[in-house]
Image: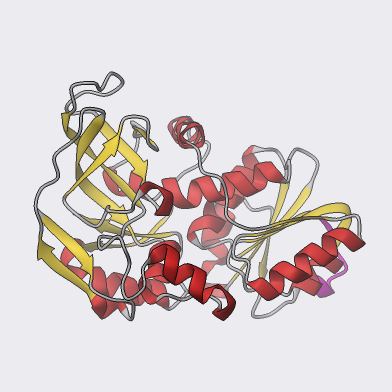
Amino acid sequence: MKAIVTTRYGPPEVLQLREMEKPVPRSNELRIRIFATAVTSADSRIRGFRVPISFWLFARIGLGLRRPKKAILGSVLAGEIESVGKDVKRFKVRDQVFAFTGHNQGFGAYAEYRCMPEDGMVTIKPVNTTYEEAAAIPFCGIVALYFLRKANVHGGQKVLIYGASGDIGTFAVQLTKYFGADVTAVCSTANLKMVRSLGADEVIDYSKENFAKNGVTYDVIFDTVGKSSFSDCIRSLKKGGAYLHTVVAPWLGLRMRWASMTNDKKIIGGTPTLRTDDLIFLKELVEAGKIKPVIDRIYPLDQIVEAHMYVDKGHKKGSVVITV
């Protein structure tokens, strides 16, 4: 099978297309023919080993000293089950599925085939999506859902989403509206129209206005990209409000812990817990027309270097998908 192998940590050029042995499913596994995957922020960070200095040693031990332990990256997939192990009960050959295959699942989606355990983070894909659209859901959709649930977002609240046009941000806007809250979305000039189309009640162009200086306060502020000012966010929260942050560097983690001890605001960050039930929940919302994946660009597998270059620029609108 064809697969993209990460030969070492570094720029996108470390990704190389190679021929690999086709995996054989174990008794409890499915072998999935992958039709689409995506370049998530996690894939990009691991490939480039972009971690805070204070995390460097632990990250090298966990991810691999000279190169990623998992040579084939790829955190999400959508495809068709080609074969199943003898003990598999929930799935059958030709089922169309989508899945999360990130760090705790072993990666491996940058390939033509991937074996996954039946009880892994895999389920039937939404019937109203293409494989490309389905691949854009698992990582960013589950991360957005996790943080919004931790903050108990609900009707009557005012929620600000910073980085609303990114892969996590586009789902955060839609899920917040689904939960009944009012959304103020912060993004660049080029993405204002797109973010409004997702249901945002108000859109702020960060290149022209600092949301923290307009005197408005919010029940929840969700920084999906790690680029807002922590101090600005805390000042813009209502009493008892919640601050959500998906990318926590050590210095920010210390500030967040101190803030949580010295005021009445809820500070939520760190690595989210990802569950298959959440993937199923997102599938049901997509099928009901409540949310939809947003795709910026689609690249073929042999152009994955170009796809990573584009993602590294930090300006993608929604997801960048790879067809396999």
Residue 316 appears in the rendering: no
> Left or right of 13: which side holds 237?
right
Is residue 77 in view?
yes
Residue 261 placed where, x, y %?
87, 60
- Above-or-below relation of 247 to 144: below
Residue 215 belongs to the span the image colors magenta: yes
Q: Is 112 one of the magenta-colored residues?
A: no
306 to 152, vertically: above or below:
below
Q: In which quarter of the image is the C terminus?
A: bottom left
Give residue 237's quadrant in the image: bottom right
Query: In the image, 19: left or right of 172?
Result: left
Q: Residue 74: percent from the left, percent from the top? A: 32, 57
Q: In which quarter of the image is residue 297?
A: bottom left
Colouring scheme, one of rainbow, by chain, secondary structure, one colour: secondary structure
Please give the range of residues in magenta.
211-219
Q: In this view, does 116 lie to the left or right of 207?
A: left
The location of residue 45, given as percent across then percent down, is: 43, 70
Residue extending furthest toward the top? 89
**Residue at 47% across, 30% down:** 284
